[in-house]
Image: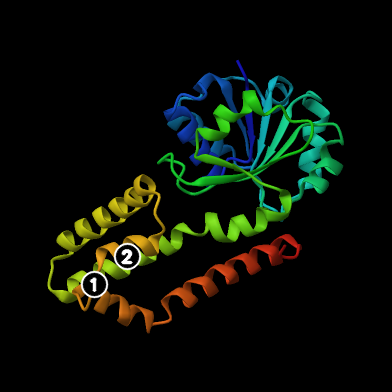
Amino acid sequence: MSQIHFVGAGQMAEAIIRAALSRQAVLASQITLADIDESRIATLRDRYQLTSALNDSEALAAADYIVIGVRPQDDIDGVARHICQHASPQATVISIIAGVTLERLSAQFGATRPIVRTIPNTLTDTGFGYSGVVFNAHVKPEPLMPFLESFGKVMLLEERLIDIFTGFAVAGVNYVYYFIESLTDAGVLSGLSRPQASKVVWENLIGGVEMLKTSGLHPRQLMDINNSPAGVGINGLYELNNSDFAAGLQRSVMTAVRRTTELSGSKPA
């Protein structure tokens, strides 16, 4: 039974723990925590009934997987030295730290240590959304995948794409929320109540995705099917085409990608 030790018990670490437990990918007895805030550790232990009594050094020695969720501006070198002092050389390090490359992680944790770099999505509780994942050559993916897949779908990437993935995929749900809010407001503006408009928007969103999946058609093909000549729908699309909607969305994504690469110190692929 694999032991998973979390170094850093912030919001994303908690989301991963919650999802992994709810999908029974791990047991509460398999999870241990370390954080500079002792009250945070106590809160999560109580909230998720984590039963291990191991201290930090003992937990590191017992860990098969070590999830590192400290902030990029923290003393990552010091964290790495502490982990290497106590952890097994075979323990896999799973970094959820944005902007810290495999090359840097290998320099800190050892050239032969299994290392995973992952950018989790923020839809962990739903089972939807992709986490971007990069393995080094020493990782054994098979036993690790059930844990990674417990907090979202997994998209294996070349590391050169990880910053682009962060700006596009992980930040991308923001655009979905914004679209839903805006379209719902349009329904209210037109005369529907907000509960009525919300229900319509949610069902259209879910139904539209299902139509794309089941039909295998391009979105443009489905729009052609959905719109009769000079009809209601095509008149609405005409006005939307005049609004700079598509280009504005694309500029937003490119700005998010650019900011991600700035934070990581890398350049876009």
1 or 2: tag closer to the N-terminus: 2
Residue 32 percent coordinates (x, y)? 60, 27
Query: Considering only vertical position in the picture, is 237 above or below 13?
Result: below
Residue labelled with disc 1: 233
Residue 151 at x, y percent in the picture: 50, 37
* Mark 1 burial class by Cα count in 10 Å: few <14, some 14-19, many 20+: some
Q: Is residue 218 left or right of residue 203?
A: right
Q: Is residue 63 above or below residue 166?
A: above
CA separation in Å, label 1 and label 2: 9 Å
Q: How many residues crowd mark 2 within 10 Å: few (<14), some (14–19), many (20+)?
A: few
Instruction: Identify the image quadrant of the N terminus.
Output: top right
From the top left corner, tell me how far across and down residue 131 is, in percent: 56, 45
Res. 77 image quadrant: top right
Disc 1 marks a residue whose amino acid type is Gly
Quarter holding the C terminus is bottom right
Depth check, front residue: 176 or 104:
176
- Front residue of 94/132: it is 132
Residue reaching furthest to the top:
1
- Identity of the residue drawn at 86% across and 35% down: 110
Q: Which residue is mark 2?
A: 223
- Element type where label 2 sits in the image: helix
**In this rendering, is residue 56 above or below 221?**
above
| Amino acid on which the number 2 mark rests in the picture | Met
